[in-house]
Amino acid sequence: MLSGLRRSLAADVVSDELYEDLETVLGEHAVRPSPDDRVAITARLRTATGRLVDVVPRLVSPNSDEENAVVDQMASAVVLSAEQPVREAEHGYLVRLACAVLTLLDHLGEAAEV
């Protein structure tokens, strides 16, 4: 039952669209998204960051050695998601944001699989 609750909570955050956005930005065949696509993907990744920061602590029971790293990564993701890059830096920002989201997803592990 606990496993089902964990999956349900993760499913509220993790969607196929999120994985598609990560693939678009970080995937093997990633290309620079158009300006309109960058705006849309950035908005979705920012939303996902907030949700992941809310859910990760509920689903992950890090041991004391990992706990500080997880907290630091969540704090870094929040700060990064609040940045407003200049147009010339938007693509690099999007890659960094996608990497931060991917790191948070890694903490969810099996519960994040949809």
Image: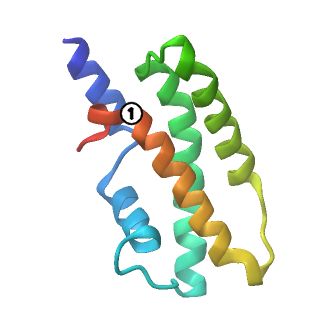
Q: Residue, x 41% and y 73% (percent of image)?
A: 24
83 shown above or below 111: below
Number of numbered discs: 1
Q: Against 35, is 53 above or below?
A: above
Kind of element beneath mark 1: helix
> In the picture, residue 28 is in which quadrant?
bottom left
| Viewport quadrant of the N terminus | top left
**Spot occupied by residue 97 in the image (x, y as percentages of width and height):** 60, 58
Q: Amino acid at mark 1?
A: Leu
Please determine whether, in this image, residue 28 is positioned above or below residue 2.
below
Q: Residue at x 36, y 28 (%)?
A: 9
Q: Which residue is mark 1?
A: 108
Decide if residue 36 is on the left or right side of residue 75: left
| Picture quadrant of residue 45 | bottom right
Image quadrant in which you'd find residue 72:
top right
The C terminus, quarter of image = top left
Q: Along the horizontal axis of the image, is 39 left or right of 87? A: left
